Image: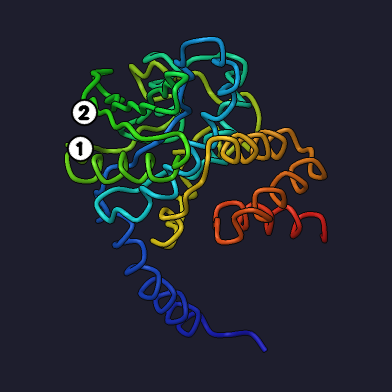
């Protein structure tokens, strides 16, 4: 039975009315969008290479910890990784300001946070971070924390607390891929057409429970976790699964490893 034009109009109006509040909330959300990028190994001494690769684990954990900050929106790490892969930046090594601006603008972020870590070879680690403004490329909010290498999560938690308490980020409109004057104006090289034309922030990170950051995760376990993330990014599901399980065998309450393991097992079951 065909519906009359008036009934169709009423149905359409009801749909628009229902959709408007959600749209209005999205438009009203002016919290800065932040992309946390990888952290470089600046360690010194003969054991420097022992710390290669843990920057990805630090990045992932810092993202999840900062996601609890209601004043900002933090881009999910997997979305960042997809952009790095699409832009062929995964082999670029250290993150420089130009790369940070390029990736940040593609993601639709207003700010990028990244930095480095350094072990002195005597059981101490320093973690540094700063922000880059996507509009001006200006560096700001330089911060540093230090702790023993047997408590990496404590180090990251301390950095999160410092960033949340002291960082100054102004709300700005998100950039779109191809914006005039954008250093990242080149379109994404792969993905759907909508990814090439719209802001690349369709997912934000989910916060962890507070107890996770109290886990005394050592540097060796953080390296295993980082390697697991790397294998997951490379689509090596079996290797990533085994490594996540290795971390969880020692630290069963380490929520980020369990989340990623659940993702892999969910994909494997499809």
Q: Nearer the viewer, residue 53 or 35?
A: 53
Residue that appears at 47% across and 39% down: 150
Q: Earlier in the sequence, mark 1 or mark 2?
A: 2
Q: Is residue 158 left or right of residue 61?
A: left
Residue furthest front in the image? 122
Percent from the top left, x then y, of residue 99?
A: 44, 17
Q: Residue furthest bottom?
A: 1
| Residue 51, position as x, y percentages in the image | 55, 23
Q: Secondary structure at mark 2?
A: strand
x%, y% of residue 95? 45, 17
Question: What residue sits 60% from the left and 34% below the top?
Answer: 223
Q: Does dot 1 land on a helix, a strand or a loop?
A: loop
- Residue 167 has which mark? 1
Quadrant occupied by the N terminus: bottom right
| Residue lying at 29% horizontally and 53% vertically, measured from the top left | 69
User: Which residue is identified by label 2?
Assistant: 141
Which image quarter holds the C terminus?
bottom right
Residue density around tag 1, few if under 14, some if 14–19, many if 20 or more, within 10 Å: some
203 or 65: nearer the eye?
65
Instruction: Indicate left or right for 229 with 169 as reference.
Output: right
């Amino acid at each position: 039975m065909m519906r009359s034009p008036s009934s169709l109009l009423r149905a359409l109006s009801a749909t628009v009315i229902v959709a408007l509040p959600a749209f209005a909330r999205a438009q009203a959300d002016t919290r800065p969008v932040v992309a946390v990028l990888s952290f470089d190994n600046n360690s010194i001494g003969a054991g420097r290479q022992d710390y290669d690769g843990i920057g990805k684990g630090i990045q992932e954990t810092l993202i999840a910890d900062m996601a609890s900050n209601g004043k900002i929106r933090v881009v999910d790490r997997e979305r960042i990784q997809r952009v790095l892969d699409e832009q062929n930046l995964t082999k670029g090594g250290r993150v420089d300001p130009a790369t940070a601006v390029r990736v940040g603008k593609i993601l639709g972020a207003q700010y990028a946070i990244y930095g480095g870590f350094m072990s002195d070879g005597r059981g101490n680690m320093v973690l540094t971070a700063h922000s880059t403004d996507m509009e001006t490329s200006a560096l700001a909010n330089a911060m540093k924390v230090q702790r023993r290498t047997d408590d990496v999560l404590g180090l990251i938690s301390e950095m999160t607390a410092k960033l949340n308490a002291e960082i100054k980020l102004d709300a700005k409109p998100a950039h779109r891929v191809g914006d005039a004057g954008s250093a990242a104006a080149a379109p994404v090289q792969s993905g759907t057409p909508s990814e090439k034309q719209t802001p690349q922030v369709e997912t934000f990170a989910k916060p962890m429970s507070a107890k996770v950051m109290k886990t005394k995760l050592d540097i060796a376990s953080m390296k295993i976790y980082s390697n697991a993330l790397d294998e997951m990014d490379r689509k090596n599901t079996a290797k990533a699964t085994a490594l996540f399980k290795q971390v969880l065998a020692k630290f069963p309450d380490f929520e980020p490893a369990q989340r990623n393991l659940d993702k892999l097992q969910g994909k494997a079951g499809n």
